[in-house]
């Protein structure tokens, strides 16, 4: 009888019976190096609620499958686990094909697609109770509508009666000064990023196929990092020996001083640390054309 008890104590726990979330939580909360999920979230630049959802197995609270697997891989590596085993276990739990590709292990996947953010914002707005200001506006909506109409009339009168300067009004002159000449993009602009650099940027990226774009300064500090969708435009800052990393180099058009240069890499190929120097990029493009 005593032998049976000893044998039972020596039996290793069956990790195969655990879910991926249980394996992650055990690795974080047991052993000598217990860690808080908040600390790990900051180190990995992944939202705390996403890591918590992984541990809880609440995959519905996470973005697309590729991000679930990417988050899990990075989390497993941080906890000293075998990332491939954790990823495969999650694939089994999700019932997805084992051939599903996840981002490169060095890729920053902290950013989440805008569609996910908008869904969460919409959900949060439904929980906001009606405030006093809203009630006041509802009770006095006629005054607000009347005031708005008066403002519109005043603006139209100013536009009509402002003195002319040559063939253009003052209002038209202001608009002309603020216009920015942009390249002849291949597809319509979806959303602009880095607009603080728009007036003087010598290098502009437009994403044709979904790609991760990260820009770092000479000290390695991240200036910009985001997964961009087709049509998105990013105006890169000038100087400071900035470098860019593209997750899908073949899916990004690069415009240098209004000229479209050859792709920095092939489709689904990651290109690391390209120096954002306009002269160097243009010279390299000329060499490729020879």
Image: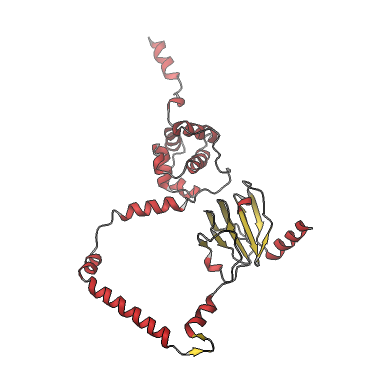
Residue sitting at 77 percent across and 58 percent down? Answer: 287
Residue sitting at 50 percent across and 60 percent down? Answer: 191
Which x, y percent locates residue 270?
A: 63, 48
In the displayed structure, would residue 46 be above or below residue 176?
Answer: above
In the displayed structure, would residue 131 be above or below residue 96?
Answer: below
Residue sitting at 54 percent across and 78 percent down? Answer: 176
Q: Is residue 256 left or right of residue 40?
A: right
- Residue extending farthest to the top is 1
Which x, y percent locates residue 165?
A: 52, 89
* Residue 36 visible to an observer of this rendering: no
Residue sitting at 47 percent across and 38 percent down? Answer: 33
Which quadrant does the N terminus fall into?
top left
Q: Is residue 286 left or right of residue 23?
A: right
Which x, y percent locates residue 90?
A: 47, 34
- Residue extending farthest to the left is 139
* Residue 87 visible to an observer of this rendering: yes
Q: How many marks?
A: 0
Q: Is residue 3 left or right of residue 79?
A: left
Camera-side residue of 207 and 103: 207
- Residue extending farthest to the right is 290
Camera-side residue of 220 and 207: 207
Camera-side residue of 7 and 201: 201
Toward which corner of the image does residue 238 lie, by quadrant? bottom right
Which x, y percent locates residue 246?
A: 61, 52
Q: Is residue 251 left or right of residue 71?
A: right
Which quadrant does the C terminus fall into?
bottom right
Q: How is the image coloured?
A: secondary structure
In the displayed structure, would residue 133 be above or below residue 222?
Answer: below
């Amino acid at each position: 009888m005593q032998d049976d008890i000893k044998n039972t104590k020596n039996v290793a726990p069956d990790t195969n019976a655990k879910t991926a979330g249980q394996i992650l939580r055990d690795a974080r909360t047991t052993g000598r190096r217990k860690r808080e999920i908040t600390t790990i979230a900051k180190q990995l630049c992944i939202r705390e609620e996403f890591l918590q959802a992984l541990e809880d197995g609440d995959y519905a609270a996470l973005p697309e499958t590729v991000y679930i697997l990417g988050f899990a891989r990075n989390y497993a590596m941080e906890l000293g686990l075998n990332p491939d085993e954790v990823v495969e276990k999650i694939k089994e739990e999700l019932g997805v094909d084992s051939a599903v590709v996840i981002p490169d292990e060095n890729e920053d996947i902290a950013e989440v697609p805008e569609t996910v953010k908008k869904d969460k914002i919409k959900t949060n707005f439904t929980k906001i109770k009606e405030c006093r200001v809203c009630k006041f506006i509802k009770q006095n909506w006629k005054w607000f509508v009347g005031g708005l109409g008066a403002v519109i009339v005043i603006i139209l009168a100013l536009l009509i009666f402002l003195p002319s300067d040559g063939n253009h009004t003052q209002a038209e002159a202001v608009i002309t000064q603020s216009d920015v000449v942009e390249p002849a993009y291949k597809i319509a602009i979806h959303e602009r990023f880095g607009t603080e650099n728009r007036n003087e940027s010598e290098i502009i990226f437009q994403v044709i196929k979904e790609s991760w774009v990260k820009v770092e300064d000479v000290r390695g500090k991240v200036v910009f990092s985001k997964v961009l969708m087709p049509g998105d435009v990013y105006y890169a800052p000038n100087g400071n020996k900035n470098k860019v990393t593209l997750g899908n180099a073949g899916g990004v058009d690069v415009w240098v001083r209004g000229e479209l240069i050859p792709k920095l890499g092939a489709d689904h190929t990651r290109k690391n640390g390209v120096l954002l120097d306009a002269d160097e990029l243009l010279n390299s493009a000329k060499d490729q054309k020879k």
